[in-house]
Image (cartoon, helix red, strand yellow):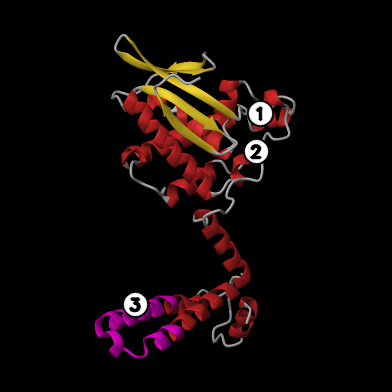
Amino acid sequence: MELNQYQKLAKEYDQNPNEKIMKSYIIPLFGVIGESGALISEFKKSFRDKAAHTKFKANVEEILGNILWYVANVASKLNLELDAITSKNLQKIKERFPKSGEIICVTELFDQNYPDNERLPRRVILRFEEVNDNDNRKVKIFLDNQEIGDALTDNSYEDDGYRYHDVFHFAFAAVLGWSPVVRALTRSKRKSNPKIDEIEDGARAAIIEEAISAFIYQYARDHNFYNGIDKVDNFLIKTIRNLSSNLEVSVCSVSEWEKAILEGYGVFRNLVKFKGGNVLVDLDNREIQFLGNAEVN
């Protein structure tokens, strides 16, 4: 039986069908709570009594059916369809926990159809150099032996490594194919399309990206800069996606953002540890890697 068909038939047995009266929601909402408690109780009995609890599966089946009826009841009252609900839920789960080999990246890079000079560099090696200026540590970035951007300090009372934070923008570029900041640094703005140049590659988009970078950083500081951590908090990524919801990067999945964050911080930790080094930014393979301090040809 299809979910929508079940939902339609279940609705026929609703004893409080008036969806405009809040009281009609009380029974299904309390029903979900009560049946959830009953489900937990069944598992408790199974753990306690083991094989002696012979009706465990049958009882669980009945309880799950009750929960489904209550869920369908609430959905019907709100004119929501179970088919649509389950489809969206599976899509969300697929994005968050893709199977091995599943394609999780956008089908093509955002600047795929633009001239070469308006594309983010596809594969480059950056050199991050740390220098002392009157006891003030600064980081310079070099691309093809040419310094790009301004030398950065921590802009903080304490030495927290934020002077290396441009690596996060390059991680966004590598994994997401998106970074207004990197476009400015590499002079690859899409000027042939004035609207895209203004909205996607302009100052407002760059400010949003900087805000996202700073927001992630504050969270990362409290989590050992993601050292030994292979998942990013759902709330964090949801907030990031909300901040960027009006930009092209909004099509990127949760797992892409997670990959960009974790790989970016992996490189960041090495840059701080070794006080600089070489970094591979590879958009073709959607990755960013720390290559060490040795000279790279």
Residue at image point 61% right, 86% down: 12
Residue at the front extreme?
297
- Disc 3 or 1, which lies upstream in sequence? 3
Q: Give the secondary structure at mark 3.
A: helix
Q: Left of 181 or right of it: where is 57?
A: left
- Disc 2 or 1, which lies upstream in sequence? 2
Q: Is residue 37 magenta?
A: yes
Residue identified by numbered label 2: 109
* CB under 8 Å between discs 2 and 1: yes
Q: Residue 163, relative to residue 131: is it above or below?
A: below
Residue identified by numbered label 1: 119
Question: Which disc number belongs to residue 236?
Answer: none
Q: Which amino acid type is marked by label 1?
A: Arg
Q: How far across and down, in percent of the image, does residue 78 sit? A: 59, 70
Q: Left of 78 or right of it: where is 162?
A: left
Q: Which residues are magenta?
A: 32-61
Per the model, the C-alpha gap separating discs 3 and 1 is 55 Å
Q: How far across and down, in percent of the image, does residue 30 sit? A: 42, 77
Q: Which amino acid type is marked by label 2?
A: Leu
Residue identified by numbered label 3: 40
Residue at image point 56% right, 49% down: 253
Residue at image point 41% right, 36% down: 265
- Whether residue 202 is visible here, answered yes or no, is yes
Q: Give the secondary structure at mark 2.
A: loop
Per the model, the C-alpha gap separating discs 3 and 2 is 47 Å
Q: Left of 63 or right of it: where is 95?
A: right
Q: Which amino acid type is marked by label 3?
A: Ile
Q: How far across and down, in percent of the image, does residue 201 sit? A: 63, 29
